[in-house]
Image: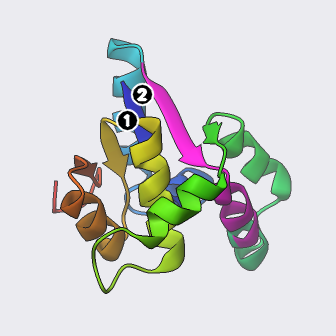
Amino acid sequence: MIAYLDTSAAGKLLADEPESGALRAHLDDLIGRMDTEIVSALLVETELRRMATRVGIPQAAASDVLIRLAMIEMDRNLFREAGTLPGSTLRSLDALHIAAALQAGADEYISYDPRQLQGAEAVGLRVRSPGRSRE
């Protein structure tokens, strides 16, 4: 199984937020019960490190989160696919995350961003937000 984490989800592994515990439990469950790979686009490195800087979290903590993720390289085809995804409200970086999840063959798309969740569902990805009422 492949579970894709966008930056809104990865950020909950970096900073203690209301959904952090539920997300950790969900990921532990996935990893514990089946052969699961947790992936994200290389883009998450910049986004997570900027988040750490904004909120005063040491970069070593960001590195600890990033080391657990298999990174998807972002080639020209991925950027093209992201640009052609449906949805007039989907932002560029959100589209890149969704295109990366599609390219990786993700079985589950984990996000806490309503626009991304809507965009991911629109292209057939199974979406999750552990700890949110939407679950």
- Mark 2: amino acid: Asp
Query: What residue sits 64% from the left and 33% below the top?
Result: 68
Nearer the observer, 100 or 66: 100
Nearer the observer, 22 or 100: 100
Please indicate whether residue 77 sits to the left or right of residue 128 in the image: right
Nearer the observer, 63 or 69: 69
- Mark 1: amino acid: Ala
Q: Which residues are magenta?
A: 36-50
Q: Is residue 65 visible?
A: yes
Which element type, helix, strand or loop, lies under badge 2?
A: helix
Q: Is residue 5 visible?
A: no
Residue 91 among those drawn in magenta: no
Residue 41 among those drawn in magenta: yes
Residue carrying label 2: 28
The correct choice, above or below, for 66 with respect to 78 in the image is above
Based on the displayed image, in which of its 4 quarters is residue 134 positioned? bottom left
The percent position of residue 58, horizontal first and vertical second, equals 82, 59
Query: What residue sits 30% from the left and 35% below the top?
Result: 107
- Which label is found at residue 67? none
Query: What residue sits 35% from the left and 14% below the top?
Result: 34
The correct choice, above or below, for 42 with respect to 132 in the image is above
Residue that extends furthest to the bottom in the rendered view of this protein? 88
Nearer the observer, 31 or 73: 73
The percent position of residue 7, horizontal first and vertical second, equals 54, 61
- Do tag 1 and tag 2 residues touch (Cβ < 8 Å)? yes
The percent position of residue 50, horizontal first and vertical second, equals 74, 71
- Which label is found at residue 25? 1
Which element type, helix, strand or loop, lies under badge 1?
A: helix
